[in-house]
Image (cartoon, rainbow, N blue to C red):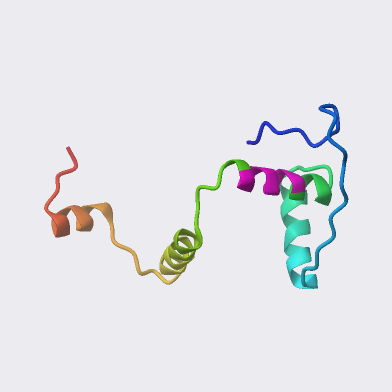
Amino acid sequence: MSKADTNDDDGDDIATVNFKVTESFLDEIDDTWQGRGFNSRSEFIRYTLRDAVEFPTFDRDELVALLEAEEDIREGRTTSAEEARERFGTSDE
């Protein structure tokens, strides 16, 4: 979670930013912020942007790999831990 504040207690002026998204993506955003207990869409977007700026841990290639892994899981293209240990010659100890 980000420690950055979204109010102007530190003297920074508040700026309004407008951007465009598709209606279907906006629906996903709304489902997400409401489902995660945020008070508003703006609060969720500020939190998400702040977190992305402060903790830029994923690059595009890593996100693509995560999406591909999720698809593999959904399609049942996975390997058990036991199969992986056998394949790579490792032990569970």
Q: Nearer the viewer, residue 1 or 56?
A: 56
**Could you tell whether 42 is left or right of 3 in the image?**
right
Residue 48, above or below 2? below
Q: Nearer the viewer, residue 38 or 15?
A: 15
**Could you tell whether 1 is left or right of 63 in the image?**
right
Prevailing secondary structure of the magenta residues:
helix
Q: Residue furthest top?
A: 9
Q: Quadrant of the C terminus?
A: top left
Residue 17, above or below 3? below
Residue 64 spot, x, y in % from top left: 48, 66
Q: Nearer the viewer, residue 78 or 5?
A: 5
Residue 61, above or below 89? below
Q: Is residue 48 magenta?
A: yes
| Residue visible at 88% across and 51% down in the picture | 16
Residue 31 spot, x, y in % from top left: 75, 57
Q: Is residue 79 magenta?
A: no
Residue 43, above or below 24? above
| Residue visible at 83% across and 42% down in the picture | 39
Residue 35 spot, x, y in % from top left: 73, 49
**Could you tell whether 74 is left or right of 51 in the image?**
left
| Residue visible at 35% across and 69% down in the picture | 77
Q: Quadrant of the N terminus?
A: top right
> Magenta residues, as a range?
46-53
| Residue visible at 56% across and 42% down in the picture | 55
Residue 23 spot, x, y in % from top left: 80, 71
